[in-house]
Amino acid sequence: MKEEEREYIGGKHSVLEAFQSKRAIHKIWISNTTQPHWSQPIYEAAKEAGIIVQSVDKRKLDQMAPGLQHQGVVAQVAAAEYMDLDEMLNQLEQSERTPILVILDELEDPHNLGSIIRTVECAGANGVIIPKRRSVGLTMTVSKTSAGAVEYVPVARVTNLAQAMETLKKRGIWIVGAAGEAKQSLYDLDLNMPLAIVIGNEHNGLGRLVREKCDFLAKLPMYGKIQSLNASVAASLFIYEAVRQRLAKK
């Protein structure tokens, strides 16, 4: 894992999830107005982990993390711990299930990333791959939107997405790109194979090189006047179609 800059998470649930997943926590601040029965689990977890907890005025928490729904507790953590791509792929080889990865091509909205990570965790998929440049990373907003799933889903951040896709292919993973102009419907494809699903940028879709690296493209049927879906919604539909096909084979 590679540790990035520190940032803050807030809320009892998020902080306790961070403890449970062994995320690096540097310090915790708790409002001096919180009820003891509410804050006691955090104090106990911090004591066991040897982490400093400071009681402060609620206004200090508001200043430390403006806009964060902290509920009276803020923790300073490593904002993003990214898994090495090779490490992620080595883990896949140990899995008994046919893997599903999600590749995000320059996704910009942290809410989309958080929602996709949440879907990946809920669906039992294996990880997310994002580029280092022109892409949102694992920010505080992503963590909150993922509802704690960011603590459990491996995320690899790579320098060159097209090269990473070639690496996946060499490891036996097939790549399907979500593209509105594709000739094939998602529901006409056999996805019961080691699979990576590529979701493009919210505005421009898949980049040219990324599109060319896909083994095949697929579209979702569109019958309304609006001819595109939110990126996180499209990702969810692709992921769960792959899951459905796996279940149907059992």
Image (spheres, rainbow, N blue to C red):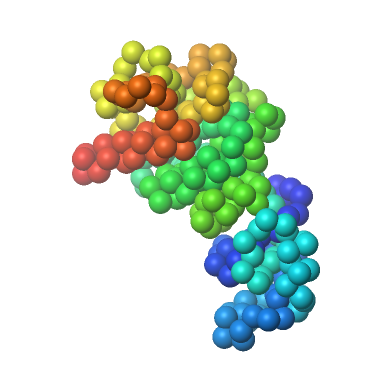
Going by the picture, which residue comes out furthest to the bottom? Answer: 36
Percent across and percent down for residue 185 are: 30, 21
Residue displayed at 70% across by 75% down: 30
Q: Residue 235 appears at what percent x and percent y?
A: 43, 35
Q: Pick whichever, 228 or 116, lies toward us.
A: 228
Can you see residue 222?
yes
Q: Which residue is drawn at 26% across and 37% down?
A: 245
Horizontal and vertical percent position of residue 85: 59, 38
Query: Is residue 20 in sight in this rendering?
Result: no
Position of 170 with respect to 185 (left or right) is right
At 58% from the left edge and 32% from the top edge, which residue is drawn? 107
Looking at the rendering, in which quadrant would you find the C terminus? top left
Image point 31% across, 17% down: which residue?
Answer: 184
* Numbered marks: total: 0
Q: Is 37 located above or below residue 183 in the figure?
A: below
| Residue 147 position in % (x across, y down) | 51, 56
Is residue 176 depicted above or below 3 in this figure?
A: above
- In which image quadrant can residue 134 be found? top right
Q: Quick one: 240 or 203, which is closer to the camera?
A: 203
Left or right, 221 with respect to 54, comes to: left
